[in-house]
Image (cartoon, grey):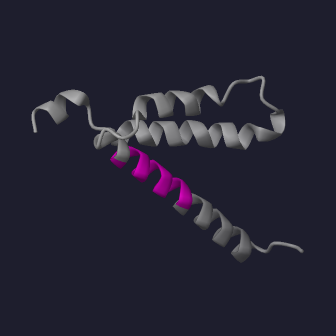
């Protein structure tokens, strides 16, 4: 089966949607105290180690992007205490 541009764009959009949902859910769970967002972000970054197979470079880059997105959405503990 050969993917045309439309198929590729749809797949890319679906993957982006799932990634966005994972980040938003992680940030929400972190805010509720049900998940350690800083640890999850750190683990995503550590999964990008250079000793992982070169074929997984795209996955390493994606995990780094997810970690950055989660870090941007996380509420600093000082702001939570003032609520």
Please report the residue visible at 26 percent of the width from the left and 31 percent of the height from the top: 76
- Where is residue 39? Give x, y as percent: 46, 28
In the picture shown, does residue 52 fall above or below 22? above
Q: How many marks?
A: 0
Residue with the most extreme left position: 82
Where residue 58 sits, quadrant-wise, is: top right
Which region shows up in magenta?
A: 18-28
- Where is residue 80? Give x, y as percent: 18, 35
Where residue 60 sits, quadrant-wise, is: top right
In the image, taking residue 6 as reference, residue 22 lies left or right, namely left
Please report the residue visible at 74 percent of the width from the left and 24 percent of the height from the top: 50
Q: Nearer the viewer, residue 3 or 67?
A: 67
- Where is residue 71? Give x, y as percent: 40, 35
- Classify the position of the N terminus by image quarter: bottom right
- Where is residue 30? Give x, y as percent: 35, 40
Main SS class of the magenta portion in the image: helix
Residue with the most extreme right position: 1
Please report the residue visible at 57 percent of the width from the left and 36 percent of the height from the top: 64
Residue 53 forms part of the magenta stretch? no
Residue 27 forms part of the magenta stretch? yes
In the image, taking residue 11 as reference, residue 26 lies left or right, namely left
- Classify the position of the C terminus by image quarter: top left
Please report the residue visible at 29 percent of the width from the left and 42 percent of the height from the top: 31
In the image, taking residue 17 as reference, residue 7 lies left or right, namely right
In the picture shown, does residue 18 fall above or below 59? below
In the picture shown, does residue 52 fall above or below 16? above
């Amino acid at each position: 089966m050969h993917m045309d541009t439309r198929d590729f764009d749809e797949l890319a959009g679906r993957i982006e949607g799932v990634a966005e949902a994972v980040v938003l859910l992680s940030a929400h769970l972190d805010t509720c105290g049900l998940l350690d967002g800083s640890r999850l972000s750190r683990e995503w970054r550590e999964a990008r180690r250079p000793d992982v197979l070169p074929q997984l470079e795209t996955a390493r880059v994606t995990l780094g992007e997810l970690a950055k997105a989660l870090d941007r959405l996380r509420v600093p503990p000082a702001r939570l205490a003032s609520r």
